[in-house]
Amino acid sequence: MTRACPFKCEFPYTAADSTTDTDIRGWTWTMPGLSNLNIVLGRVYTQVEDDHATPVAVVGADIVDNVLGGGDPLGKEIISNEKQKLYVVGVVKDVYTKGLWQEMEPMMIRYVLPEQYGQVVVSTRPEKVAVVNAFMNEQWNKVFPNRLYNGYRMGTMLTQVDQLGMSIVYGYAFLGLVALLLSVTGLYTLLSLNILKRTKEIGVRKILGAQVFNIIRIIHTEFVVIIVIASIVGSMAGFTWCQVIMGSIWKYYQSANILTFTVAIAILVLISFTAIAVKTFHIAMMNPARTLRDE
């Protein structure tokens, strides 16, 4: 059973109060073990405490830092909006109860009375999942013959997140590849037109003793400037676009960093200069007499 309500923390040693909206999870004593929670301080409540409805709770690290004022939270008293006093016996590492889609809420785990049970969580070995699910479906139909069985695997949501992430990666990888090919093609075309206009100049320079390296440098300089400007503008536009798109889908995500743009620029420069070098080296090695005769 899951529900959300505000609770108020009262400190025995001070008159200051602190209140926050909290995601309260009502679990039996076995549920923390099934969920593989990371207990960073203290413990979870025991079967004896659960059976006797002992007023204890496990809180998230966010509550300790922002509500309980830091320090040692064990034994501190918290009061829910139902005016029920609970004592902290453990602290759990913050859990993204809403996945990476929405902002993480402070979480508290407490016991739940049998008449408040609303869900059943079953743990089994991987090879027994299908058999156990079929058994649960059969038992569900006996208990609730008029209700559709709604059991699901706890990893279903994680699988959906992975599929969405990979679909975005494949989509933008395809768009990036197309953009890269168009950019290199345009650059190569611009280079070819520039060389055609400067064919006579290149022939004269070779007759006057210009080295192949100097001719390549003269032709390359203009396109190096173009690539540098394109890399800077493209990186800024790409970073802004990534932030907008990813921020509209997820609350928590790994944003593009320097390594991302370094690799992208390196690939662009490598392919561009390969295409430019092949073309300019071919022109620079041509016989200048033939070049001037054709002109």
Image (spheres, grey):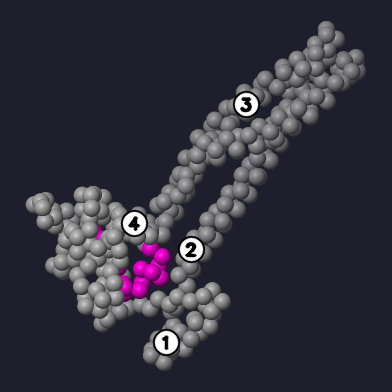
Q: Is residue 117 left or right of residue 250?
A: left
Label 2 sits on a secondary structure element that is helix
Instruction: Tell me the residue that label 4 is attached to.
Output: 40
The residue nearer to you, when weighing 119 against 203, is 119
Q: CA distance from mark 1 to mark 2?
A: 25 Å
Sequence-earlier tag: 2 or 3 = 2
Q: Which residues are magenta?
A: 21-37
The mark lying in front, picked from 1 and 4, is 4
Which amino acid lies under the numbered mark 4 shown in the image of this protein?
Answer: Val
Instruction: Tell me the residue that label 2 is attached to.
Output: 158
Q: CA distance from mark 2 to mark 4?
A: 24 Å
Question: Tag on residue 110?
Answer: none
Tell me the residue at 54%/74% (across/down).
Answer: 126
Instruction: Tell me the residue that label 1 is attached to.
Output: 140
Can residue 67 be seen here? The reply is no
Give neighbour class at mark 3: few <14, some 14-19, many 20+ (Cα, 10 Å): few
The mark lying in front, picked from 2 and 4, is 4
Sequence-earlier tag: 1 or 3 = 1
Instruction: Tell me the residue that label 3 is attached to.
Output: 226
Sequence-earlier tag: 1 or 2 = 1
